[in-house]
Amino acid sequence: MRSLRVFLLVWISLVQVAVQGQLLMSQSSCSGGEKFMQWMPPHLLASFFTQLAGGAVMAVGAWTLAKKSDYISLLSSSTYSATAYILVVAGVVVMVTGILGCCATFKERRNLLRVYFILLLCIFLLEIIAGILAYIYYQQLSTELKQNLKNTMTQKYRKLGEERVTSAVDKLQQEFKCCGSNNYTDWADSVWIKSSEASGRKVPDSCCKTITDLCGRRDHPSNIYKENGCITKLENFIQEHLKIIGIVGISIACVQVLCGIVWNLELAGLKKPKRMEKLVF
């Protein structure tokens, strides 16, 4: 969450700098301010911030899918991955529409601008949807894990065709130093543990504090993570990332709304800006 706070503080600082710079240049009579306004009018500043917002949204979505998706196979719902995919799609569309908006402005094509604003609205809705889905799933996650995690671990672990679940369970137990959903006794109900393939193991080897071949045969507290179940740790892990997805999606959507307002005010002629002229050096 520290990185998220830094991200939000940077965004607030950038917006403040842009607003203060805009005010100073509008009040200044010096030629330098006028030249800057010719080369960087408000709608281009808005486009710049929109592009940055799109890149940030896409980065958060891609980061979630690439680095934090190991445990998706343990979830019965696809909402977690869906929110990340929505952010990636929204970010890509923002990058493309930003170019469209700049071209429409320079060529003074109002039809293209209408398309740009429609796309911007669609992006805004996508980001809001991602934020809302993240919030809803945040509330439902505890119930889902209590109902499904134990069954997933005991019924699918080491099952043919469920290699992703097996890998996720092993990584979960090692990374969070836990064993089973609620505790190590959950593995007594495992289809794999009951089979001859387990070779007498009482728990998977990934429950061991130090993994060696067949170490799961001995379930002594000195050998395995006996007291700690994985359900609470997995819940906390996913909830932290849902917070990031929700906050980033909604906050950047608000930034894009502000940028859209600047575009509308500038291009509708409410501020009646002068046409860009070539600078004479």
Image: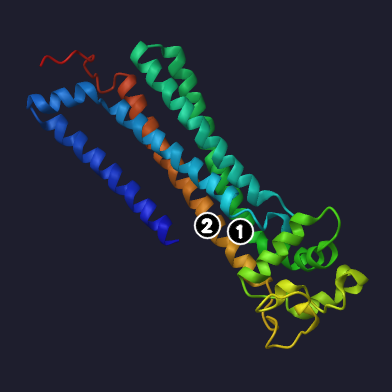
* C-alpha separation, residue under disc 2 versus residue under disc 1: 8 Å
User: Residue 2 at x, y = what percent?
Assistant: 41, 61
Q: Is residue 84 left or right of residue 150?
A: left
Q: How is the image coloured?
A: rainbow
Q: Residue at x 60, y 60 (%)?
A: 238
- Mark 2 = which residue? 243
How packed mark 2 is, by other alpha carbons closer than 10 Å (few <14, some 14-19, many 20 or more), is some
Q: Mark 2 or 1 closer to N-term? A: 1
User: Which secondary structure, mark 2?
Assistant: helix
Image quarter hosting the N terminus: bottom left
Q: In the rendered image, which quarter is residue 38 located in?
A: top left
Image quarter hosting the C terminus: top left
Q: Is residue 1 left or right of residue 181?
A: left
Q: Amino acid at mark 1?
A: Tyr
**Residue 190 versus residue 260 in the image, above or below:** below
Can residue 180 be seen here? no
Q: Is residue 222 left or right of residue 87?
A: right
Q: Residue at x 63, y 75 (%)?
A: 177
**Residue 108 versus residue 90 in the image, above or below:** above
Tally the numbered discs.
2
- Mark 1 = which residue? 138
Q: Is residue 189 left or right of residue 233?
A: right
Q: Which mark is residue 70?
A: none
| Labelled pair 2, 1 in contact (Cβ < 8 Å) | yes
User: Which secondary structure, mark 1?
Assistant: helix
User: Residue 178 at x, y = what percent?
Assistant: 67, 75
In front of the other: 88 or 146:
88
How packed mark 1 is, by other alpha carbons closer than 10 Å (few <14, some 14-19, many 20 or more), is many
Can residue 60 be seen here? yes
